Amino acid sequence: MMENRNSAGILGTGWYVPERIITNEDLEQMVDTSNEWIVERTGIHERHAAALDQPTSDLAERAARMALEDAGVAAADLDLIIVATLTPDRVMPSTASVLQDRLGARQAAAFDLSAACSGFDYAAVVACQFIETGVYRHILVIGAETMSKVIDWTDRNTCVLFGDGAGAAVFGSVEDGLGVQSFDLGSDGSGSELLQIPAGGSLKPLTAEALLMHENCVHMDGRAVFRFAVRILGETVEKSLAKAGLKKEDIDWLVPHQANTRIIDAAASRLELPAEKVIVNIGKYGNMSAASIPVALAEAAHAHRFRKGDLVALAGFGAGLTWASCIMKWAKED
Ligand code: ACO
């Protein structure tokens, strides 16, 4: 951290998942799969799905209200709202602007950030720059997704993996020395074809034919993404640790992106972390993309797992390809 900067950290967290649950047994009725395959290959037992008339902003609002209350910050005192999502309500306007109105955050600037599953970490790092320089005092960062709306429910390679949810954190100035210690953000666009929604953008506007081919849905080379993820998740945390002059054994908690338990286990093993230091909730939620990390973080915080001063490492990867990690000393009194 540069001298004369404020320390930036999390003042409060919140999360929300929609009521409807889709179990592996439900999926057995929809595609050629089995509960055993899904549990063994991914660790997922069930996931939540938004109602058809429930947009991403609805999930985001509920998580945001919980985080604001936890932080003791009024919406009117927010300076900026960043929503990390790949499933915005609409391409235009931003979901963050919709949310700003709903929350009554009249002073807040607002924008969406696109970095797929790495989005929350990216947004957290952006927020911290404004806090550290003293430009802004309170920033609401949300990872929110309705993946159920961009999934091809006839494709067993993808439909078993994803779920809907939202996680939020209010960032602000914290006690000197606490809060964010370092971060690592990265991208390798040469892998942009590996994980994509082919149609609906300027490259391939949505047509009847594209809809018929399900090109408005997530397409993924699972094996290639798996290989990338297993390498990058541990590597990015090691880079962040080195930047802060910290070692693996200094980590109290790893909050990884929840895409596959085998990917999480590989990262934990590389970082020599015992299972009890790794926050895992993939079994009940699946991969919620940008919402995975903040939901895991908020659940753990509200379960009183973090003590003030604990070293918490957030680490994600996703489409882009992108990756991100952020290391913080937990600043909130339990
Ligand atoms: N049920 C039964 N069989 C299946 C299913 C399913 N749901 N899905 C795939 N299979 C089959 C495949 O067709 C394949 O059959 P084949 O050998 O006859 O072709 C077989 O299972 C094995 O397939 P693999 O791809 O080798 O299975 P793997 O063990 O790699 O697991 C998985 C697949 C779970 C997708 C894994 O590769 C993975 O987790 N990849 C990373 C995915 C990921 O993290 N994506 C999200 C990134 S985050 C973001 O930005 C959105």
Image (tube, rainbow, N blue to C red):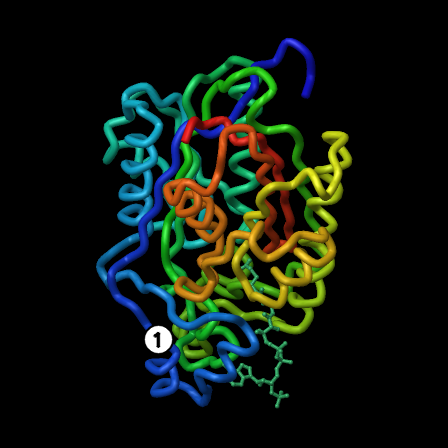
Residue 187 higher or lower than 282, as above or below: above
- Is 184 situated left or right of 83 in this image? right
Name the residue located 53 percent from the left edge and 23 percent from the top edge. Answer: 8
Q: Is residue 125 visible?
A: yes
**Residue 98 spot, x, y in % from top left:** 30, 38
Name the residue located 68 percent from the left edge and 12 percent from the top edge. Answer: 3
Residue 253 higher or lower than 158, as above or below: above
Q: Which residue is mark 1?
A: 23
**Residue 261 spot, x, y in % from top left:** 57, 66
24 or 162: nearer the eye?
A: 24
Q: Element at badge 1?
A: strand
- Is 21 situated left or right of 6 in this image? left
**Residue 331 spot, x, y in % from top left:** 50, 26
Name the residue located 43 percent from the left edge and 27 percent from the top edge. Answer: 333
Q: Residues within 10 Å of mark 1 (few under 14, many from 20)?
A: some
**Residue 242 spot, x, y in % from top left:** 77, 36
Residue found at the far bottom of this picture: 32
Q: Is residue 93 visible?
A: no
Q: Is mark 1 within 8 Å of ligand 1?
A: no
| Quadrant where the C terminus is found in the figure | top left
- Is 213 situated left or right of 313 in this image? left
| Quadrant where the N terminus is found in the figure | top right
- State which image quarter holds ligand 1: bottom right
Q: Quarter of the image holding residue 61? A: top left
Name the residue located 54 percent from the left edge and 72 percent from the top edge. Answer: 42
Mark count = 1
Residue 72 higher or lower than 187, as above or below: above
Residue found at the far top of this picture: 4
Which amino acid lies under the numbered mark 1 shown in the image of this protein? Thr
